[in-house]
């Protein structure tokens, strides 16, 4: 316990975890009184797995009608959401659904969250980017994640790509948190190595970033009575610590041996525990810069996070020395002093990224050196994340992270020339 904490913790309404637990869902949906739903997924899950058909049939036997929207895409756009809104509303012929189910990775869950708020009125999703009002009543969401990493099943935001400016926007409100988060590890058993790596490093990033982020007593909630994020606390750190420990045991193992049921299950727990941490504590520089990197490279969320992670954590090390040692010890790293331990942890994380087949520098993602200043500016423009980075000079830290990540260098201190570059940011 930390007596200075100001905790505002919002988990999913119901959290169900267990192999085969998807079989419970139709009975629970019926018990809650839902009768007409929209299942948001993509063609892969409809055509290549039995899961959609199994649920629709079992729900039908209990008097639940389910319309399947199977046009989900990676990194869903605001345009896709608006198109889906009109398509679903037309297919339902004016009959309002009373719940939405998301089956898939973070992209399908994000799209489903957005549809929860657009389907009742048919309004464009951009109208909700600035925040929801007390009159906006999202449909209840049920999330079935099929990857172990994004944690969208426990968070208040839907992240969409705005094609007009190639940036990601967020529809954010605690009412968008799922009423049911059902984590069935069997969904992840057949994930290919690339998806396993991307999702797993995303979970580890969520856990480490939220473990080191701004304290709840210092977090700017902008006077919001029901903030989506509110800084780290002893409660969020508890979940983050367990998630880091599970990643240390099972991330590489699940990547190397996809048929390892224990490792797959361990990563499912790691993912949801990390989400329970960052879903209230929030994130900071890794995600802020990664969003900007994704805008240029269009690489996956897990990959862009992974490239930035070691360098952002290095920038935090002087300001979170005790926590750095705690994380290092989880990975079996015991340096002779705080500085050595922090350095070894950052080097270990960079090596782990490489071992997962992910590039360890921005050059290998196709970023050009001439774009580093604009990349830094774009990262800082995600102010919610920049304000949560607990360093004295956030702009300087972001610039250093971006340049070190470009060159793949750890342990490089800012130079005078480096400081002068900040004048252009």
Image (cartoon, rainbow, N blue to C red):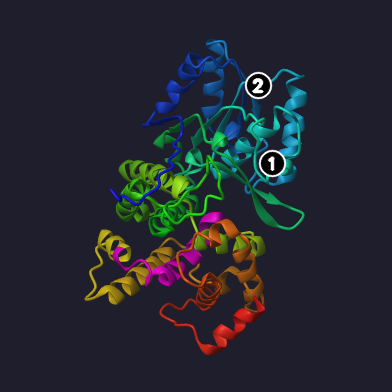
**Residue 382: x, y in percent?**
61, 59
Taking the magenta stretch, the answer to whether it contains residue 231 is no
Crowd rating for badge 1 (residues with CA inside 10 Å; few <14, some 14–19, many 20+): some
Instruction: Verify CB contact (< 8 Å) between mark 1 and mark 2.
Output: no
**Which residue sits at x=70%, y=27%?**
120
Taking the magenta stretch, the answer to whether it contains residue 307 is yes
**Residue 151: x, y in percent?**
47, 44
**Residue 337: x, y in percent?**
24, 75
Which sits in the foreground, 316 or 365? 316
Check the image and report above or below for 391 versus 76: below
Quick check: 147 left or right of 319? right
From the image, which quarter does the C terminus lie in?
Answer: bottom right
Q: Which residue is mark 1?
A: 128
Element at label 2:
loop
What stretch of residues is rendered in magenta? 300-322
Quick check: 236 left or right of 400? left
Residue 146 visible to an observer of this rendering: no
Q: Which residue is mark 2?
A: 97
**Which residue sits at x=49%, y=38%?**
153
């Amino acid at each position: 316990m930390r007596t200075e904490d100001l905790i505002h913790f919002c988990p999913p309404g119901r959290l169900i975890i267990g192999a085969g637990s998807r079989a419970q869902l139709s009975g629970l949906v019926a018990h809650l009184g839902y009768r007409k739903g929209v299942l948001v997924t993509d063609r892969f899950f409809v055509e290549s797995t039995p899961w959609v058909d199994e649920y629709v049939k079992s729900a039908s036997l209990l008097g639940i009608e389910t319309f399947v929207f199977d046009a989900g895409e990676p990194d869903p756009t605001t345009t896709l959401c608006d198109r889906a809104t009109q398509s679903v509303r037309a297919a339902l012929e004016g009959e309002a659904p009373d719940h939405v189910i998301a089956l898939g990775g973070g992209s399908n869950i994000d799209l489903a969250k957005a549809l929860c708020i657009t389907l009742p009125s048919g309004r464009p999703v951009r109208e909700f980017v600035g925040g929801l009002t007390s009159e906006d009543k999202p449909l209840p969401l049920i999330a079935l994640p099929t990857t172990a990493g994004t944690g969208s099943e426990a968070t208040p935001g839907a992240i969409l790509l705005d094609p007009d400016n190639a940036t990601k926007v967020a529809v954010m409100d605690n009412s968008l948190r799922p009423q049911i988060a059902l984590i069935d590890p069997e969904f992840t058993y057949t994930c290919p190595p690339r998806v396993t790596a991307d999702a797993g490093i995303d979970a580890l990033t969520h856990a480490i970033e939220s473990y080191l982020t701004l304290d709840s007593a210092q977090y700017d909630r902008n006077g919001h009575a029901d903030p989506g994020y509110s800084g780290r606390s002893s409660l969020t750190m508890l979940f983050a610590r367990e998630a880091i420990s599970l990643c240390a045991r099972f991330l590489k193992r699940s990547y190397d041996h996809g048929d390892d049921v224990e490792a797959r299950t361990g990563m499912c727990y790691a993912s949801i525990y990390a989400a329970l941490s960052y879903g209230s504590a929030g994130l900071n520089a890794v995600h802020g810069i990664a969003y900007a990197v994704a805008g240029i490279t269009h690489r996956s969320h897990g990959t862009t996070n992974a490239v930035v992670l070691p360098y952002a954590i290095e920038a935090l090390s002087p300001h979170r020395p005790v926590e750095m040692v705690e994380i290092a010890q989880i990975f079996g790293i015991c340096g002779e002093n705080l500085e050595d331990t922090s350095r070894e942890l950052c080097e270990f994380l960079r090596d782990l990224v490489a071992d997962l087949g992910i590039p360890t520098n921005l050059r290998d993602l196709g970023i050009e050196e001439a774009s580093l200043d604009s990349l830094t500016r774009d990262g800082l423009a995600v102010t919610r994340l920049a304000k949560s980075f607990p360093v004295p000079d956030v702009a300087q830290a972001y610039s250093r992270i971006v340049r070190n990540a470009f060159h793949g260098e750890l342990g490089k201190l800012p130079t005078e020339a480096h400081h002068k570059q900040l004048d252009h940011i």
